[in-house]
């Protein structure tokens, strides 16, 4: 097949678009960002969004389950507004920036195919997971930007003369972006593994003699001090949580691994998943320039894939945990398709992929805009994103009928939405697992009366008088949430008596500061 004339291989991340592919990509990214901003006020915050919004409202050096970057970023819009729309502006901009960085990296790695960057951006945005999370503030949002900038800086270092002023500045840039990544999510440790693999495979031992490398290490370490100080204050609970998370099950099971992989196949599309695995597996005997590019992408993508594949044997991994890996490998998939486009079976596979994904995307996005599909009860795909503000107003009315009562939820996922939409009122969690809510709110006094909000897809509260439960509960009211005369979800409000504070077990229950909690 004939190749298109290459786009100029500029190393500038931001310049006036000149090539048609650049203009088309910029237009596409802008359209996606505008769509995300339109959706921003149409649905309530997801469980994770609400949880991290509470981070922003309760600023700290770090948090129980994640480093602080997501909370620090959320604190910015909270200076002006507590609306769902405001909280989704920064993640929308971060995702747009990630798309642009992906485009620039793609064209730099594969300069003989000027449309590879646009192809990668389109492929990523056709995946359900990226559509759902493109305007959601998660730790992955700043992590994606920081990782792509780490990758870009590594490309510059590979081409920079050793021990020069320019290389020293590049090392400091690398240290800074590694620091941002580490402040975003603990899985940024995989970036260190990737850098070590590059040194070994490309025999860049001279990097170890670079003063800039050690300056970068110092800079990253300084940036991580908030996490270190916070953990030292709380018996290293966040580090211990990450070490225990996903490994508490004694039985490692291939079935859980298979379920995790099938979920990724569905939410990232068969084309990106299968093509990505092919690129990652086949790229290690690198001879040609495009093979070296594939290998670089694989070096940064595989550690995340391997980490969560192994962990999923203990506990099924959530699909978005590998989001970064599929983003990184997408340029290699597009270039592989272009190289072999003359093969009929490949063209059929690509066409079938988009025949499947486009209708699913249209249905999903229309359901987000206005729920119209009459799903069976508790099967609506947007049920968790509707009705929380109304439910909180109903709960407050019930609280007035029961002076001194407090808001409760069965677990942290429900508590996230309740605590956010009832902010600054506290929400107490009735289970015996230690989490961020116990650090924020502690335990209410024994014998407290609670208003327990239970969405229809969850179980009623337990009332057996055991630790973490009440001695009695009765259903006070039910609030159905309707759209187009379709019940999307309903909220049940229980008035419960005589709360018994939980007793924290396991590794967290043994920590001195947890034992000291009232």
Image (cartoon, rainbow, N blue to C red):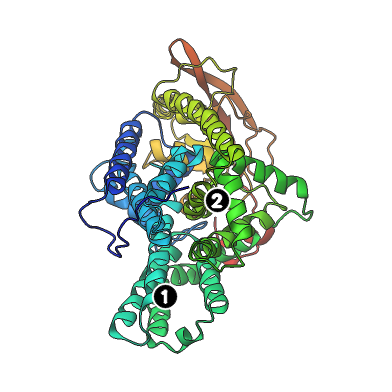
**Residue 33 visible to the viewer:** yes
Element type at mark 2: helix
Question: In the rendered view, does 209 fall on the left or right side of 465?
Answer: left
Above or below 240: residue 197? below
Depicted 173 relative to depicted 2: above or below: below
Q: Residue 515: in sight, yes or no?
A: no
Which of the two discs, 1 and 2, sits closer to the camera? 1
Query: Callout 1 environment at 10 Å: few (<14), some (14 to 19), or many (20+)?
Result: some
Which residue position is annotated with label 1? Answer: 158
Can you give x and y, in whole percent of width and height, for residue 29 in the image?
32, 43
Question: Toward the viewer: 62 or 288?
Answer: 288
**Label located before the other in sequence (1 or 2):** 1
Tag count: 2
Farthest residue in the front direction? Answer: 2
Residue for badge 2: 321
Q: Quadrant of residue 411?
A: top right
On screen, residue 164 versus residue 458, left or right, reads: left
The quarter of the picture where the C terminus appears is bottom right
> Going 25% across and 58% down the picture, which residue do you hit?
14
């Amino acid at each position: 097949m004939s190749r298109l004339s290459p786009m100029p291989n500029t190393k500038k991340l931001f310049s006036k678009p000149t090539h048609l592919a650049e203009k088309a990509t910029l237009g596409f990214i802008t359209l996606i960002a505008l769509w995300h901003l339109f959706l921003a006020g149409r649905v309530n915050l997801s469980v994770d969004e609400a949880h991290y919004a509470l981070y922003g409202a309760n600023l700290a050096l770090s948090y129980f389950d994640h480093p602080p970057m997501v909370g620090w970023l959320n604190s910015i819009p909270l200076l002006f507004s507590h609306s769902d729309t405001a909280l989704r502006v920064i993640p929308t901009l971060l995702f747009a920036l990630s798309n642009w960085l992906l485009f620039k990296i793609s064209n730099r790695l594969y300069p003989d195919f000027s449309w590879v960057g646009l192809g990668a951006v389109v492929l990523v945005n056709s995946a359900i997971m990226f559509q759902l999370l493109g305007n959601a503030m998660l730790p992955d949002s700043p992590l994606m930007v920081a990782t792509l900038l780490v990758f870009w800086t590594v490309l510059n270092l590979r081409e920079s003369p050793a021990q020069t002023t320019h290389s020293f500045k590049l090392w400091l840039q690398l240290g800074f972006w590694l620091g941002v990544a580490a402040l975003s999510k603990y899985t940024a440790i995989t970036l260190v593994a990737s850098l070590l693999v590059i040194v070994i495979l490309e025999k860049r031992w001279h990097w170890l003699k670079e003063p800039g490398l050690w300056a970068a290490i110092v800079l990253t370490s300084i940036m991580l001090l908030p996490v270190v100080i916070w953990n030292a204050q709380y018996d290293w609970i966040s580090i211990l949580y990450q070490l225990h998370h996903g490994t508490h099950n004694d039985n490692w099971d291939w079935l859980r691994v298979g379920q995790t992989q099938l979920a990724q196949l569905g939410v990232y599309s068969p084309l990106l998943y299968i093509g990505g695995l092919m690129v990652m597996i086949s790229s290690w005997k690198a001879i040609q320039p495009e093979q070296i590019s594939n290998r670089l992408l694989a070096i940064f993508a595989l550690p995340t894939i391997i980490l969560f594949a192994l962990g999923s044997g203990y506990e099924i991994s959530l699909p978005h945990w590998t989001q970064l890996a599929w983003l990184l490998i997408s340029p290699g998939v597009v270039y592989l398709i272009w190289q072999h486009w003359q093969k009929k079976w490949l063209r059929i596979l690509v066409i079938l992929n988009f025949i499947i994904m486009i209708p699913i995307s249209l249905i999903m996005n229309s359901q987000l805009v206005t729920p119209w599909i009459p799903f069976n009860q508790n099967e609506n795909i947007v049920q968790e994103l509707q009705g929380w503000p109304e439910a909180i107003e109903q709960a407050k009315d019930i609280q007035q009928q029961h002076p001194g009562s407090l808001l409760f939820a069965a677990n942290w996922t429900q508590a996230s939405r309740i605590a956010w939409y009832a902010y600054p009122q506290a929400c107490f969690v009735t289970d015996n697992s230690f989490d961020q809510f116990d650090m924020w709110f502690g335990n209410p006094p024994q014998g407290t009366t609670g208003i327990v909000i239970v969405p229809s897809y969850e179980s009623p509260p337990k009332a057996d008088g055991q630790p973490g439960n009440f001695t009695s509960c009765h259903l006070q009211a039910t609030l159905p949430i309707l759209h187009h005369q379709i019940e999307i979800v309903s909220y049940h409000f229980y008035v419960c008596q005589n709360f018994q504070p939980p007793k924290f077990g396991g590794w967290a229950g043994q920590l001195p500061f947890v034992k000291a909690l009232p």
